[in-house]
Structures are given as structure tokens and as C-alpha cells.
Amino acid sequence: MRTIDIFVRDRNGRPLYQADIAFSVDGAYAGEVANSEGRGRIELPDRESVIEVTATYDGVPQHEKLAQDQDDFTFKFDVDPAPPIPPPAPPLKAHPDLIDALIIILIAGAVDIFLFAMAAQFISSPVFQKLPSFITDAYTAIWSSIVAGGAGIGGAIVKAFTRKANVQAPNYLVYVLATAILGLIAILLLAVVALRIAPSGASLQIPPGVHRLNPKSNDGREQTFDLERPAASSGPAVVTYVLKGKISLKEGKVSGRLENGIFRTGENFAPLGPVRITRLEFSTCYIRRIASNDQIDSYPPPKSANAQDLDIVLERNKTYTLPPMDFSFELPADSDSDKMWLCAAIRQDTGAYWPAI
């Protein structure tokens, strides 16, 4: 058994949506993942076959021939579909004057450094571990606070002696405490946001128009579903299909029945060898975060409760009726309840499959 994973990324390493991934086995067309979400997979019975993969984005193709011991490959396109995020504008701060502002910032910085240095000794938290070394390293932080605080206090003393008699001195205690508190809040927010936002990829969103699965709707109420092949990015579709039926959700378990399934091949369906549909399976597609990146997975794997074996040899410009079937499966436990939807896969004898969402 051989499983090959193909990924399509932009110049920043983010998944490229609407990229088409086509497979050929020993020179014969073996299927495609059209309008993909930046990834595709093919399963083969052995490692003897010669696998070639073509990824196309925005009309530009890339081709790769895989070695027999190669089980994955990443296509990279020099594009950036997401616009750059402009840096946040610096906050406007009102201070009595420039010298007073420097004094307040120095003393407030010393307080923040000292507090983080002490907290790092008692709190075992990844947020503190991600902060700069002058905060997590107690020795450096304490001595830095002494130096910074000394400079601020010295500046305040000099300013007090040189201030004119008719000029009122600012309330340093209020300004320092307020600045120190704002500094602590800003550092904590930046640390939390930095841990939650993936540095190398955008957060994935649920595709539009899908049939969502919400575990909170646990009343077993029956609903209708309509799953279709995603529209082709350009030109006529090679194949189209529609899966319609009813579904219900109760106690974390999905139960449904396919009542009407139609599969059509188009005029441009011209594989080099025979293509056979071997299985229809239903599952949950969901988004989960691994490390600092989102990825789309499906659950559960194919088994008798959520899959049905088929034996349909496809010909060009034909319409096939898929037999009705009952299916059931459990929802994944490691997923966000707001990021799950019903999906299906029509598998071929080559191991490739057509997705339906």
C-alpha cells in the first residue's frame, strides 16, 4: 500500500485554494482534485507504478514525476493571494513634555521588567517562555530593572531641581503606575496573539455553502443535505455529481441516508485507461490546529458503517445512478464545534478520489 500526499503553497507557505491537482499512474490519467484546498492524496496498492502529478493555479501548471520511494511533494507558486497586513499605527500618547515622558517610561519599564522576572520564577506558562529573554531570565531582568529604574529616578531628581518655580510638577506616581499597567497588558496581549496566530499560514475558514454539523444541535431532528462536486476553476468539468438525502445528529453521532445520487462524465472525460468507481463514503470534514497551522481533516476513516462498495466503469458523456445507502459515524473529538461539515468522497480503483461538499 502506498499513500502519496501532494501540497500546493504560495510564496509564504500558505495553502493555495482553487488549485487543481491531477494524477497519472504509469502514464494513464488517474483522477484529479479540482478546486482543491491546497492538498490532494492518492492511494496505490504498491510502489511499482510511476506517478506523475500536475498542479495548476490560475492557469499556470507545474509538473513533477515522483520517485518510487517518494510519498509526498510540495508545489510552490510565486504568488501571494492574500494582501499584506499593514502594521498597526503607533498609539498617540499625551505627556506633559518630552523629559517627563522619558522619565515615566524608564521607571514604568523597570517595574514591568521586575514583575515579569519574578512571575517567570513561579508561573510555568508558555506565554512567559515566549517572551524576550530579558523577561524570562531572572538574573538579567533584575539587573536591567535596577539600571533602568536608576536612570529614571535620576532623571526625575534632576528635573525636580531644574524645574521653574511657577511650573507644576506632574504626578509621577499616577503616570508611572498607569504606564506600567498598560505595558503589562500590551505585552500579555501580544504574547497570547503571537501564540494563537500561525506565523507561516492564514487561518482556514469553512468553505461556503457546505452542510454544517453542529454538536450543539443534538435533538436528532432530520435535515436534508445536498453535496456536489466543487465547480471547476476554468473550462467544462470532467465529471459532475450530486448526492442528496437526509441526515440527523444525536448524542455526537451522525445518521443519514443517501436517497438520490447522480454521477455524470463530460465530453472531455478522456482517461488513458479504464477508470472504475469502487467506493462511496461519507464523513466529517473539519478544521483543526496543529502546532501553529490550521489543516483540514476528515473523520472517521472508511468502514462499513459510513461507506459502500461500488463497481462502476466510467465512460465518456454518461450518467450513472448511485445506489441508495444508509450511513452513520461519530463526530471527531479533537475539533472545534463551529468548524465541522458533512462531506463525501467517491473513490477510484487507483486510490484517487473526487470530493463532495
Image (tube, helix red, strand yellow):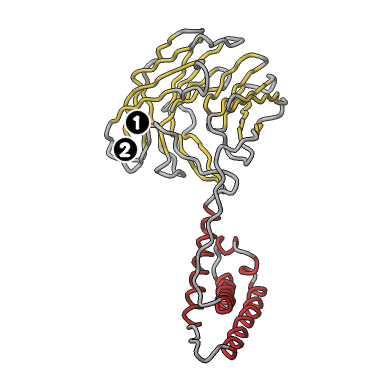
317 vs 106, nearest the viewer? 106
Quadrant of the rendering where the C terminus is positioned: top left
212 vs 100, nearest the viewer? 100
Which residue is pictured at 37% across the width and 32% down the height?
A: 211
CA gap, disc 1 and disc 2: 8 Å
239 vs 348, nearest the viewer? 239
Which residue is pictured at 61% across the width and 33% down the height?
A: 7
Q: Height in image: 133 above or below 211?
A: below
Which residue is pictured at 51% across the width and 44% down the height?
A: 203
Q: Which residue is mark 1?
A: 255
Tell me where residue 257 appears, x and y as whole percent.
Answer: 34, 24
Dividing the picture into quadrants, the one containing residue 195 is bottom right
Dividing the picture into quadrants, the one containing residue 123 is bottom right
Q: Residues within 10 Å of mark 2 (few under 14, many from 20)?
A: some
Does dot 1 land on a helix, a strand or a loop?
A: strand
Q: Is residue 175 left or right of residue 161?
A: left
Does dot 2 land on a helix, a strand or a loop?
A: strand
Q: Which residue is mark 2?
A: 250
Q: Height in image: 73 above or below 27?
A: below
Quadrant of the rendering where the N terminus is positioned: top right
Q: Are marks 1 and 2 in contact (CB under 8 Å)?
A: yes
Dividing the picture into quadrants, the one containing residue 114 is bottom right
Tell me where residue 103 appears, x and y as whole percent.
Answer: 58, 79
Type of residue at label 2? Answer: Lys
Q: Is residue 299 left or right of residue 21?
A: left
Type of residue at label 1? Answer: Ser
Choose the circle earlier in sequence order: 1 or 2: 2
Q: Residues within 10 Å of mark 1 (few under 14, many from 20)?
A: some
Res. 64 mark:
none
Q: What is the count of numbered marks?
A: 2
Tell me where residue 217 appears, x and y as whole percent.
Answer: 31, 40
